[in-house]
């Protein structure tokens, strides 16, 4: 039997470079997104089979609504198709899907497909796949702050209840901190991805465009991660 790789608890992937992958091949950006979606499914299944507990994927940022309407529409339709049809294989593999992000201005049919997938997979006990869709780290912190202010106003909490742990519990999803964040596509920035959860994450940047990220490169990155010395402020 093939040996399993030693995995961190929570991996985040900023899936960037779909557009450039397509342009390089003389294809439309949409075709890049289609190829990226296939990669995403393949890598989720691989990591789940390896025994990963938490995987967060940056699928669409709040800022991505600034793109041309045609591209946004393609992506929204692609999300629906993925959630309704292609993710059946993830359900079979026991993956539990949750979402992080704002509802507005997502279309109703997109929200419905998200909700359906979440409900269908809610009792699964494999990897928790957190899909960040219409997600922005700054909005997540603003939304959490509003929630805590409401609780404070209603005397449900006192100021002393506001601890880092309580903040984590009140983000879009109560997930453990990120251990490893991988960004494909050559840029070295967070672009508003999981600001709070990434406090002590290790970062890996690769020039590979997301559709070309494969199990071999992912395994190499994880093996490199295992060699890093994480000190968490100690010595
Ligand atoms: C990432 O690929 C996917 C989304 C942001 C939805 P891009 O679409 O950003 O691809 P590039 O960066 O333009 O190549
Ligand atoms: C980050 O990629 C968002 C996602 C991967 C969904 P972008 O392509 O939107 O980031 P910037 O614009 O290069 O910072
Ligand atoms: Mg990009």
Image: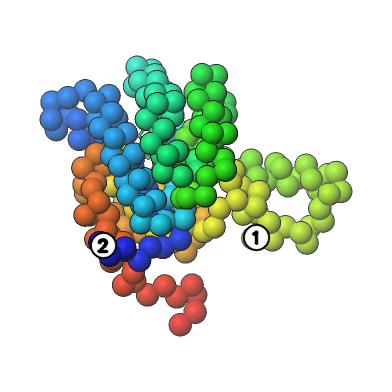
Q: Which residue is drawn at the image coordinates 39% and 51% (left, top)? A: 48
Where is residue 98 drawn, in percent x and y?
53, 40
225 in relation to 166, above or below: below
Disc nearer the start of the sequence (2/1): 2
Quarter of the figure with the N terminus: bottom left
Coloring scheme used: rainbow
Circle 1: is it few (<14), some (14-19), or many (20+) Cα within 10 Å? Answer: few
Which quarter of the picture shows residue 229?
Answer: bottom left
1 in relation to 35, above or below: below
Disc 2, ligand 2: is the CB inside 8 Å? no
106 in relation to 11, above or below: above
| Secondary structure state at the residue bearing disc 1 | helix
CB under 8 Å between callouts 2 and 1?
no
Front-most of residues 220 and 22: 220
Residue 140 seen? no
Residue ID for mark 1: 165
Front-most of residues 77 and 82: 82
Q: Which residue is drawn at the image coordinates 23% and 48% (left, top)? A: 214
Going by the image, does 155 lie left or right of 198?
A: right
Tell me the CA gap for discs 2 and 1: 40 Å
- Disc nearest the viewer among 2 and 1: 2
Where is residue 2 drawn, in percent x and y?
25, 61
Where is residue 207 drawn, in percent x and y?
21, 49
Q: Which residue is drawn at the image coordinates 54% and 57% (left, top)? A: 176
Front-most of residues 63 and 57: 57
Where is residue 208 drawn, in percent x and y?
21, 47
| Secondary structure state at the residue bearing disc 2 | loop
Which quarter of the picture shows residue 41?
Answer: top left
Residue ID for mark 2: 1
């Amino acid at each position: 039997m093939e040996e399993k790789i030693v995995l961190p608890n929570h991996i985040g992937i900023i899936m960037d470079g779909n557009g450039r992958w397509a342009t390089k091949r003389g294809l439309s950006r949409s075709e890049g997104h289609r190829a990226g979606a296939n990669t995403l499914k393949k890598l989720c299944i691989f990591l789940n089979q390896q025994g990963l507990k938490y995987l967060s994927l940056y699928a669409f940022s709040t800022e991505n609504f600034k793109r041309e309407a045609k591209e946004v529409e393609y992506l929204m339709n692609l999300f629906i198709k993925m959630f309704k049809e292609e993710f059946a294989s993830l359900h079979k593999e026991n993956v539990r899907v949750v979402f992080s992000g704002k509802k507005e201005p997502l279309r109703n049919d997109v929200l419905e497909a998200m909700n359906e997938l979440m409900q269908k997979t809610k009792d699964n006990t494999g990897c928790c796949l957190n899909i960040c869709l219409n997600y922005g780290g700054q909005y997540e912190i603003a939304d959490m702050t509003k929630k805590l202010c409401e609780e404070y106003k209603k005397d449900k909490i006192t100021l002393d209840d506001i601890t880092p742990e309580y903040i984590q519990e009140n983000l879009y999803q109560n997930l453990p901190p990120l251990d490893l964040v991988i960004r494909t596509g050559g840029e070295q920035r967070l672009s508003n991805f999981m600001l709070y959860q990434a406090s002590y994450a290790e970062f890996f940047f690769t020039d590979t465009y997301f559709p070309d990220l494969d199990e071999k490169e992912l395994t190499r990155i994880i093996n490199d991660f295992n060699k890093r010395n994480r000190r968490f402020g100690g010595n």
